[in-house]
Amino acid sequence: MMSHDQASNLRKRMNRLTTTRQTKTIAVVSGKGGVGKSNFTLNFALSLAGQGKAVLIVDLDIGMGNIDILLGLQANTTIVEMFDKQLPIHDIIEHGPHSINYIAAGSGLSDLFSLDEAKFNYFIDQFETVSSEYDYVFFDMGAGASDESLLFILAADECIVVTTPEPTAMMDAYGMMKHIHQRNASLPFYLLVNRVENAKEGQQIIQRLQKVSERFLAKTLHVLGMIPFDKKVSRAVIKQIPFSMFDTRSPATRAINQIAMKYVSNQTDKNDNDKSPSSFITKLKRLLKER
Ligand SMILES: Nc1ncnc2c1ncn2[C@@H]1O[C@H](COP(=O)(O)OP(=O)(O)O)[C@@H](O)[C@H]1O
Ligand SMILES: [Mg+2]
């Protein structure tokens, strides 16, 4: 007789085998720090999970990662430890609320990405074994981009650029977009404006960034949406509860749910089934060779 645990493990493995998903990898970036990338990533992921999507967040802000802190959870292991101890990736995937999964960043390495090629290949092989279990894999990046973390951004299917209405954040967001665009002109950019006073202000920021992007990069910026300034967000951070769970009806929560609904329905419309599920891995391998 199989034990309950064995049966449940077997079921999980079967599910993995039968549901190979069209995984989408998404890098969440900004020029300036503190604009709300991690809060956005976590709550967007939770909202997608609420729509039945399988989501993994990889915290790549090594040394300053905080997805586990925002969740009020203590990660057992981290991505840094995966490299140090050659752990299988399944051992470092932590489980959050609403069945979202995450990999904590950890610290100890000033730069995860200054790794030698063998270690990088180890990561790629490990990542390949799990990526098809998810509909969406988010990379929550640190501010700016070191050369190696840039590889993850360049290999991703999409890039979400987060800014606030502050001119400094906008300038840095533009600088970041330019930096990425010069290296991969076909990567789609989705703009998210966080902490807006009102919809009018948000629209102005979107239009301004769209204009400079079209004029100087000859690139169309997709609009992901805007999230209002909401004091419940910082209260939720203090309580270590994701803001969309802290208050399910606050302005920021409503906004993020609306953005996630629209995002999913746009993708179903597009119906991009011809996309290879392993394009991220393929691109990352190629970028590594060119390094
Ligand atoms: N929509 C918002 N309204 C109010 N405060 C916000 C909002 N989004 C983020 N914040 C504040 O900004 C801080 C930094 O957010 P965080 O997600 O950690 O930024 P990043 O990951 O870009 O460094 C949060 O701790 C929170 O206090
Ligand atoms: Mg962050």
Image (cartoon, rainbow, N blue to C red):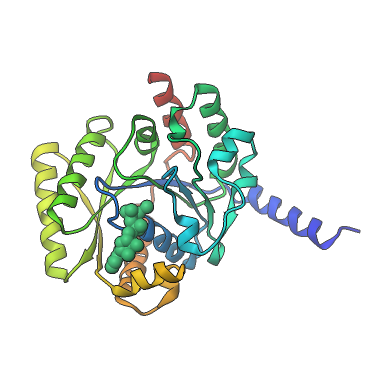
Q: Position of residue 138 (x, y in %)?
A: 43, 49
Q: In which quarter of the image is the C terminus?
A: top left
Residue 35 seen by the camera: yes
Q: In which quarter of the image is the N terminus?
A: bottom right
Q: Decide which of 188, 93 is in the foreground and name it.
A: 93
* Residue at point 17%, 44% (across, down): 174
Please determine whether, in this image, residue 189 is positioned above or below residue 117.
below
In the figure, residue 80 lies in which quadrant? top right
Residue 110 appears left or right of 233: right
Please determine whether, in this image, residue 38 is positioned above or below residue 282.
below
* Residue at point 16%, 59% (across, down): 165
Q: Position of residue 223 (x, y in %)?
A: 23, 56
* Residue at point 59%, 50% (across, down): 93
Residue 160 appears left or right of 168: right
Q: Decide which of 68, 250 is in the foreground and name it.
A: 68
- In the displayed image of the protein, which residue is found farthest to the bottom? 249
